[in-house]
Image (spheres, grey):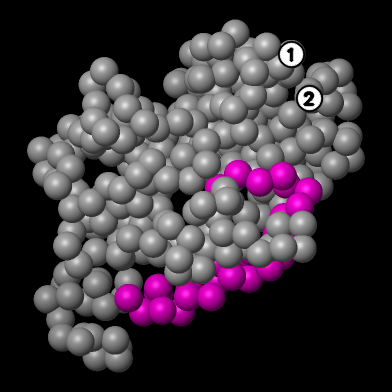
Amino acid sequence: MFEIVEKRELAENIFLTRVKAPRIAHSAKPGQFVIVRADKVGERTPLTIADYDEQEGTVTLVTQALGVSTRKIVAKGAGEYLADVAGPLGRPSDFMAEPIEEVRKRKYIFVGGGVGAAPVYPQVKWLAEQGCEVDVIIGAKSKDLLIYAEEMRKVATNLYIATDDGSEGFHGLVTTLLEKLVTEDGKQYDCCVAIGPMIMMKFVTLTAKKFNLPCIVSLNALMVDGTGMCGACRVTIAGKTKFTCVDGPEFNAYDVDFDEAMRRQGMYRTQEQRALAIERERAAGHKCNIGLDK
């Protein structure tokens, strides 16, 4: 059991949960994730680590409440417990294994879309602590859905905000802003890292390709066990099958078959919608006749 020491809403249906997990906090590195179960019968949900504090022994998670399992996680408040938080899982960001002198020579641009801004944060924070120059773009549909802007301002060299409706910062997509920074503002970068919806990462990759800019993406594939045994998170990388949980979650963006990955993401959408409908019926105290009630 893992105690929740803080829970707060960052934006509509997006919640921060900080849990007591000393062993994970001691071992966690930027780029890694955990698998969470809200209760003993809960589904295993992969969540990227948004921050960790070794001294406090806490790990910060950011969850968007979309389906039954994520709604169960965010329903729990401070003082309550999550049944399982397993990790850290996955490979740390590549720069963690490189000589810091080489990392400091690069200028990074991170692009975080929606909830993807949260896992961008520990990477930017770590690089900033090493004296690296790091620019960040975070995007959302509107100002009300932006998260981690204040936290990012404290660690980024420059923070740029893009909203689809123009309610905050640049009026437009993160890809358009990235192109503007390079073509109009004369920014030069050595590496781009994108984390967010799969479609956003695909188009960030296409934008970076215009400028021969190396690009890394963190894939949020379907996942079950997190150890490479179930095969649910398989993706095609440079024509070969890889598993997001053990080979990733970060990959060279130019090697990713995004179209296949997006098709796989939608495989269980009907079942998810039915499960959510069942849960809503149960919460309302109605007998469920949708066909999955057992």
- The kind of residue tagged 2 is Asp
- The structure residue drawn at horizontal position 32% and vertical position 23%, both measured from the top left corner, is 53
Q: Is residue 112 above or below residue 107?
A: below
The crowd level at tag 1 (other Cα within 10 Å; few <14, some 14-19, many 20+) is: few
Which disc is residue 190 wearing?
2
What stretch of residues is rendered in magenta? 249-275
Q: Main secondary structure of the magenta part?
A: helix
- The structure residue drawn at horizontal position 62% and vertical position 33%, both measured from the top left corner, is 94
Residue 82 percent across, percent down from the top left = 19, 49
Residue indicated by mark 1? 105
- The structure residue drawn at horizontal position 39% and vertical position 62%, both measured from the top left corner, is 225
For label 2, the SS is loop
For label 1, the SS is loop
Relative depth, front residue between 63 and 261:
261
Whether residues under marks 2 and 1 lie with C-beta atoms below 8 angstroms apart, the answer is yes
The verdict on residue 258 being magenta is yes
Q: Nearer the viewer, mark 2 or mark 1?
A: 1
